[in-house]
Image (cartoon, grey):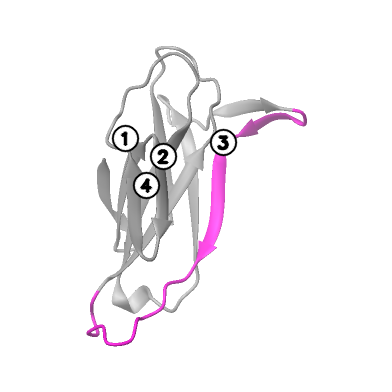
Amino acid sequence: MRTTRGLGDMKVTILLADAAEAVNGKLYVLGGGWSITGPDPSPMALAIKIEVPWDQSNQPHVCRLELLDSDGQPVEMETPEGEREIFIEANFEVGRPAGVKPGTPIDLPLAINVPPFPLDAGGRYEWRLSI
Protein backbone atom coordinates (compact mmCIF):
# COMPACT_ATOMS: atom_id res chain seq x y z
CA MET A 1 0.00 0.00 0.00
CA ARG A 2 1.32 3.40 -0.85
CA THR A 3 -0.17 6.74 0.04
CA THR A 4 1.14 9.90 -1.55
CA ARG A 5 0.22 13.56 -1.52
CA GLY A 6 1.06 16.04 -4.17
CA LEU A 7 -1.48 15.20 -6.86
CA GLY A 8 -3.04 18.65 -6.63
CA ASP A 9 -3.69 18.11 -2.92
CA MET A 10 -5.44 14.82 -3.68
CA LYS A 11 -4.46 11.97 -1.40
CA VAL A 12 -4.17 8.61 -3.20
CA THR A 13 -3.86 5.11 -1.73
CA ILE A 14 -3.11 2.14 -4.00
CA LEU A 15 -3.27 -1.45 -2.76
CA LEU A 16 -2.20 -4.44 -4.88
CA ALA A 17 -4.60 -7.35 -4.56
CA ASP A 18 -5.68 -10.60 -6.17
CA ALA A 19 -9.09 -9.10 -6.99
CA ALA A 20 -11.07 -5.96 -6.15
CA GLU A 21 -14.31 -4.17 -6.90
CA ALA A 22 -15.75 -0.77 -6.09
CA VAL A 23 -19.46 -0.81 -5.22
CA ASN A 24 -21.58 1.95 -3.67
CA GLY A 25 -18.59 4.03 -2.57
CA LYS A 26 -16.69 1.13 -0.97
CA LEU A 27 -13.75 -1.05 -2.01
CA TYR A 28 -14.04 -4.81 -1.69
CA VAL A 29 -10.57 -6.38 -1.77
CA LEU A 30 -9.56 -10.05 -1.97
CA GLY A 31 -5.99 -11.05 -1.19
CA GLY A 32 -4.76 -7.48 -0.81
CA GLY A 33 -1.55 -5.95 0.44
CA TRP A 34 1.15 -7.90 -1.39
CA SER A 35 4.16 -6.46 -3.21
CA ILE A 36 6.03 -9.57 -4.44
CA THR A 37 4.59 -12.13 -6.84
CA GLY A 38 5.77 -15.40 -8.32
CA PRO A 39 7.42 -15.92 -11.70
CA ASP A 40 4.28 -17.03 -13.56
CA PRO A 41 1.91 -14.39 -14.96
CA SER A 42 -1.13 -14.06 -12.74
CA PRO A 43 -4.07 -11.67 -12.54
CA MET A 44 -3.87 -8.74 -10.18
CA ALA A 45 -6.03 -5.85 -9.10
CA LEU A 46 -5.38 -2.31 -8.00
CA ALA A 47 -7.68 -1.07 -5.25
CA ILE A 48 -7.42 2.72 -5.39
CA LYS A 49 -8.87 5.39 -3.13
CA ILE A 50 -8.60 8.99 -4.28
CA GLU A 51 -9.46 11.61 -1.67
CA VAL A 52 -10.63 14.65 -3.63
CA PRO A 53 -10.54 17.98 -1.75
CA TRP A 54 -13.88 19.79 -1.51
CA ASP A 55 -12.66 22.66 -3.70
CA GLN A 56 -11.73 20.21 -6.49
CA SER A 57 -15.08 18.40 -6.53
CA ASN A 58 -17.59 19.19 -9.28
CA GLN A 59 -14.64 19.62 -11.67
CA PRO A 60 -13.37 17.30 -14.41
CA HIS A 61 -10.03 15.57 -13.83
CA VAL A 62 -7.89 13.22 -15.92
CA CYS A 63 -5.89 10.39 -14.40
CA ARG A 64 -3.27 8.09 -15.89
CA LEU A 65 -2.23 4.79 -14.32
CA GLU A 66 0.92 3.28 -15.81
CA LEU A 67 3.28 0.42 -15.10
CA LEU A 68 6.93 1.46 -14.87
CA ASP A 69 10.13 -0.56 -14.65
CA SER A 70 12.93 -0.06 -12.10
CA ASP A 71 14.37 2.76 -14.24
CA GLY A 72 11.06 4.62 -14.25
CA GLN A 73 10.44 3.76 -17.90
CA PRO A 74 7.03 2.61 -19.16
CA VAL A 75 6.69 -1.17 -19.46
CA GLU A 76 5.70 -2.33 -22.94
CA MET A 77 3.83 -5.45 -23.97
CA GLU A 78 3.70 -7.14 -27.36
CA THR A 79 0.32 -6.78 -29.08
CA PRO A 80 -0.89 -7.62 -32.61
CA GLU A 81 -0.21 -3.95 -33.47
CA GLY A 82 3.35 -4.07 -32.04
CA GLU A 83 4.78 -3.04 -28.66
CA ARG A 84 2.46 -0.89 -26.54
CA GLU A 85 2.88 0.77 -23.15
CA ILE A 86 0.78 -0.63 -20.30
CA PHE A 87 -1.42 2.23 -19.09
CA ILE A 88 -4.99 3.30 -18.43
CA GLU A 89 -6.29 6.85 -18.84
CA ALA A 90 -9.66 8.00 -17.57
CA ASN A 91 -11.69 11.12 -16.88
CA PHE A 92 -13.46 11.52 -13.56
CA GLU A 93 -15.49 14.05 -11.63
CA VAL A 94 -16.82 13.68 -8.10
CA GLY A 95 -19.90 15.50 -6.93
CA ARG A 96 -20.69 16.93 -3.53
CA PRO A 97 -23.14 14.60 -1.80
CA ALA A 98 -26.15 16.22 -0.14
CA GLY A 99 -25.73 16.73 3.58
CA VAL A 100 -21.92 16.62 3.56
CA LYS A 101 -20.35 19.51 5.43
CA PRO A 102 -18.53 21.99 3.12
CA GLY A 103 -14.78 21.44 3.21
CA THR A 104 -15.07 17.66 3.62
CA PRO A 105 -12.88 15.67 1.19
CA ILE A 106 -14.82 13.32 -1.10
CA ASP A 107 -13.62 9.72 -1.51
CA LEU A 108 -13.50 8.11 -4.95
CA PRO A 109 -12.90 4.34 -4.79
CA LEU A 110 -11.67 2.62 -7.96
CA ALA A 111 -10.97 -1.04 -8.66
CA ILE A 112 -8.97 -2.08 -11.70
CA ASN A 113 -8.61 -5.80 -12.38
CA VAL A 114 -5.66 -6.59 -14.64
CA PRO A 115 -5.36 -9.83 -16.62
CA PRO A 116 -2.11 -11.81 -16.44
CA PHE A 117 0.73 -10.60 -18.63
CA PRO A 118 4.40 -11.63 -18.72
CA LEU A 119 6.99 -9.61 -16.80
CA ASP A 120 10.74 -10.25 -16.59
CA ALA A 121 11.56 -12.57 -13.68
CA GLY A 122 13.36 -10.77 -10.87
CA GLY A 123 12.35 -7.35 -12.20
CA ARG A 124 11.02 -4.49 -10.10
CA TYR A 125 7.93 -2.65 -11.22
CA GLU A 126 5.76 0.19 -9.97
CA TRP A 127 2.21 1.25 -10.75
CA ARG A 128 2.14 5.07 -10.87
CA LEU A 129 -1.01 7.20 -10.85
CA SER A 130 -0.88 10.79 -12.04
CA ILE A 131 -3.78 13.25 -11.95
Main secondary-structure element of the magenta-colored stretch: loop
The magenta-colored residue range is 80-104
Asked if residue 109 lies left or right of residue 61, the reply is left
Considering only order in the chain, which callout, 1 or 2, is on the residue closer to the N terminus?
2
Mark 4, residue position: 47
Marks 3 and 1, how far apart at CA: 23 Å
Give the residue at mark 2: 19
What kind of residue is marked 1? Gly
Give x and y (percent) for residue 110. Answer: 42, 55
Which of the labelled discs sits on residue 74, or is there none? none
Judge whether 56 appears above or below 118 on screen.
below
Q: Nearer the viewer, mark 4 or mark 1?
A: 1
In this view, 68 is above or below 95: above
Q: Nearer the viewer, residue 112 or 71?
A: 112
Dot 4: element: strand
**For the residue carrying disc 4, how many other residues have a C-alpha within 10 Å: few (<14), some (14-19), or many (20+)?**
many
Packing grade of label 3 (10 A; few <14, some 14-19, many >=20) is some
Residue at the image point whose x is 42% and y is 72% from the top: 94
Q: Circle 2 sits in a helix, a strand or a loop, which is it?
A: strand
In contact (CB < 8 Å): disc 3 and disc 1: no
Q: What residue sits right under mark 3 in the picture?
A: 86
Up-down: is 90 above or below 36?
below
Q: Are marks 4 and 2 in contact (CB under 8 Å)?
A: no
Numbered label attached to residue 31: 1
Q: Are marks 2 and 3 in contact (CB under 8 Å)?
A: no
Around disc 2, counting alpha carbons within 10 Å, would you say few (fewer than 14), some (14 to 19), or many (20 or more)?
some
